[in-house]
Amino acid sequence: MPMTWVGPIERDGDTVRSGFMNTVLAWDPATGAATALLAKRHNANPLWAGSGDVVVVPRCDGSLVVSRAGCVVQELRGHAPVAEVGVGDGIVGLTFVGDELVSAGADGTLRRWDALAGQQLAQTDVDPGAIAMTVGLGALVLSWPDRVSVRRPSDFAEITAHADLPNSTGWSLLAGALVGVTDSDPREVVLVQPGAEPVRHPLDYWPVGLCVTADGAAAVWIDTDTIHILQADGQLTEVPLERPRRFHTAWRCAVADGVLYASGADRGMWAFDLATGQLQQTFTDPRTGR
């Protein structure tokens, strides 16, 4: 099956944004209709980052392509491709912090950019081989398979580090805890709290996208017929989906204002009420309008 719905999902003002095939598009959350081309993607790496009408995507050679209102306006060069992870996957994290872009590379560098000006503002060397970067609770979370470095976005100084973690596809911050998904069998969502044994929740399906609420209070994932909401204290709430057969497993998700946005590779993108599981919107495939 082709992966038509790919990459992060983001609610930005009056649009919902995500990757679709070789593009990054915007949809109207009220109607579900695609409304704008934000950028074209240049390789199989699904990452992208946006701020207003500016969207940044990686290129195979490790450079970053900056688009504004769908048109390429800059290229940011500095990250080196890493053959061991595939040249297209050498960028492992992209996010805007305010007006500045932060990028993490498998080449062992963390960089901050003025994207529209095409200028690198700062660089910090870290251990090579990082696999993911997330942002939350005012911090950057840089992940290796079994450890994490939490850093300040302003100067990349390390706030705290966590070692000897279960192997994961990447970690996110909850209030006073870390949460991630294991990268080998048995597949589990793992909550790590200081001074306590990890809390593990088995997954029936794989892959599963894990997203965190903006306040860091809970992690959310969805599979087949249920929304799972895991609080930082380990409490789990399960909300049945209104129409489970329409969905199956989510590869990507985002939570904003009590709404869960989720996409499933070749299956589509939807919005669900986080509290009730009610389907609020089905976003259209721009090729068909359905």
Image (cartoon, rainbow, N blue to C red):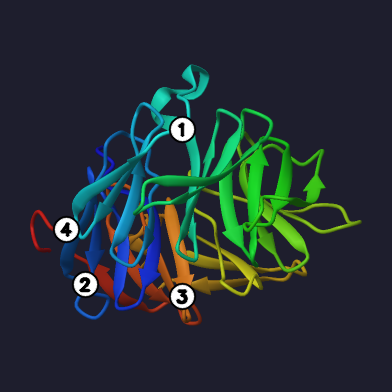
Label number found at residue 140: none
Left or right of 249 in this view: 267? left
Task: Please count the marks in the image.
Answer: 4
Determine the residue located farthest toward the right in the rendered image.
195
Q: Three-letter amino acid code at disc 3?
A: Ala
Question: Which residue is located at x 41 percent, y 30 percent?
Answer: 62
Q: Residue at x 86, y 58 (%)?
A: 194
Of mark 3 and mark 4, the one earlier in the sequence is 3
| Residue that badge 2 annotates | 32
Disc 2 and disc 4: Cα gap in Å?
Answer: 9 Å
Q: Dot 3: few (<14), some (14–19), or many (≥20) neighbours within 10 Å?
A: some
- Which residue is rendered at x = 45% and y = 63% of the image? 99
Quadrant location, the C terminus: bottom left
Q: Mark 1, mark 3: which one is toward the viewer?
A: 1
Q: Nearer the viewer, mark 1 or mark 4?
A: 1
- Determine contact: label 2, label 4, CB under 8 Å: no
| Residue sitting at x 37%, y 46% | 118
Q: Residues within 10 Å of mark 4 (few under 14, many from 20)?
A: some
The residue that disc 4 covers is 285
**What amino acid type is highlighted by mark number 4?**
Asp
Percent x, y for residue 285?
16, 58
To which residue does mark 3 refer? 256
Q: Nearer the viewer, mark 3 or mark 4?
A: 3
Q: Earlier in the sequence, mark 2 or mark 4?
A: 2
Q: Is residue 104 left or right of residue 11?
A: right
Q: Nearer the viewer, residue 37 or 257?
A: 37
State the residue in front, 233 or 225.
Answer: 233
Q: Which residue is mark 1?
A: 78
**Closer mark to the observer between disc 2 and disc 1:** 1
Badge 1 marks a residue whose secondary structure is loop
